[in-house]
Amino acid sequence: MARDHPVNEEYLETLLAELETAREWSPRVIAKLEHHLFAADDLEVFRMNPIQYAGENRIAEDECIDLFLHATKLQILDMYWQLVCPGCGGPIDSFTSLQKLNSHFYCGLCRVDGIANLDDYILVSFNVSSAVRPIRYHDPHTLPVADYILNYRFMREACVPKEHPAHEHFLRTFGVEPQVRNLFGKLALDMFYLEPGATKSISVEVPQSGYLVMHDFDNAGLHFLAVKPDAPTSEPVVELSGGKMTCPINEIPAGMLRLEFRNQNEERAAVLVFCEPESYVGAGMELAPFLSGKRLLNTPTYRNLFRSDITVGTEGLGVKDLTILFTDIKGSTELYDQIGDLNAFNLVQQHFGQLESVIQNHGGVVIKTIGDAVMATFLSPVDAVRAAIQLQEQLHGRTAGGAPGLQLKVGVHSGPSIAVTQNDRLDYFGQTVNIAARVEAMANATEICMTEDVFAVSSVPDLLRGFTVTTQMAHLKGVQNEMKVYRAALSR
């Protein structure tokens, strides 16, 4: 293949041959990745988004995630967990493994701090490995300042929300997609590096209204100057020191303005000076579709390939919405008496294998087994209910055919939880998990019990047309208020 960029061709070809055998791929999936790694611009192989890549190359999202994960395992790609600011879309921090991820964040540009969750602001991206193809973003401090600030310090997924007036105004005024990095690129009056101890003077044309904003991306300094028609003319000195940016004035008039910057920090400064229109204030941002930390943890391939890396810090990581499914075998003790220990054990192990296959086919993962019980997680209640239905129908079919049967109880609940590491394995804790377990305990053989949080989701009632559904109010252990529980019994 003709190379457009410096690629270690022999090394890459060897790795791609291994990638071909990692699993069964759809036609041309490996060829498309190979072409991308050879021909794409440096920016396009930096922080690669598997969801975006899947859409552009007509590959199923799940297969594309698998592709990137297997490529990472073979060191074709490097995987990063990005902690993204919910205000501006900038990567506050980047981690090479889940174990190093710290969900606490502070953004120097937005002046906000908080705790991110795995659903919204923990984004997983992939870079081409430097051993395969060196790119300029592997050494960000050598980047030209505009490339560093706009492309390295902002995520491509961050966009101005469509419902905010700034979105339409930006599109109409500048004629480019209102990504946050494009926004700052168009609003910029100047941007520059400033070495420690250095001084730099600039002159900028200040618009008639809004705010002149100055931010040092490398040291978190920030200062605003409000544009006021009656503000006195001056030539202020902006001091960069101790991670702060100070200026003796807070208001400036429109027109030409001369500023002098003095960097007294021990680190280089990367300064952006821009004027923010009043109508843009508080616009915030939204993220284009991306691979979230929650989805990655619910991907079987990730759990299989990176088992040793699935370690969450001692504080755990929050998940806003996760569906928990519990199953248990009804009457397993009697089964051991009826057909003998060895036969019963083999039957139960076969059941676990089939159960895991069904769960994975519906987008879930098995978290753990507790005796004869299984705990699994899903990204949506619909997927969990589909899996539960298939499990009950399969077991009912075997029992009806005269085979020694297992009878299954299933419980499903959705809500927030906390991802933690327990006994060197990823686990989930919290009231959502407790409720799912209590609901499963209510189920009889061949039944699926679920809470209103599950049943009320669109399309779930339609999925249960082959079941007899009844409701009851239940006092669940450890839950203060009564909960409505839906009991779906397989129609005979």
Image: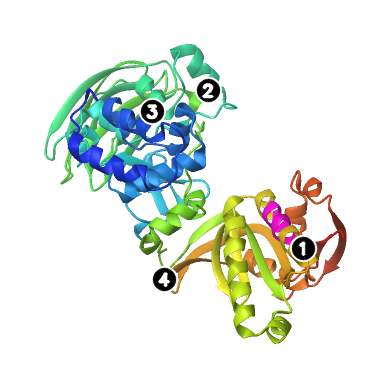
Name the residue that disc number 2 marks. 167
Closer to the eye: label 1 or 3: 1
Q: Is residue 115 left or right of residue 236?
A: right
Tag 3–tag 2 contact (CB < 8 Å): no
Q: Which residue is mark 3?
A: 181
Amino acid at circle 3: Arg
Cα distance between the residues tagged 2 and 4 = 46 Å
| Residues packed near mark 4 inside 10 Å, few (<14), some (14 to 19) or many (20 plus) | few
Q: Earlier in the sequence, mark 2 or mark 4?
A: 2
Q: Are marks 1 and 2 in contact (CB under 8 Å)?
A: no
- Do the residues bearing badges 1 and 4 touch, measured as CB atoms within 8 Å? no
Estimate the x, y position of residue 400 in percent, counting from the top left: 80, 65
Which numbered disc, 1 or 2, marks the residue that appears first in the sequence?
2
Whether the magenta-drawn stretch holds residue 56 is answered as: no
Among numbered discs 1 and 3, the one appearing first in the sequence: 3
Instruction: Name the N-terminal-most of marks 3 and 2.
Output: 2
Secondary structure beneath dot 2 equals helix
Q: Which residue is mark 4?
A: 424
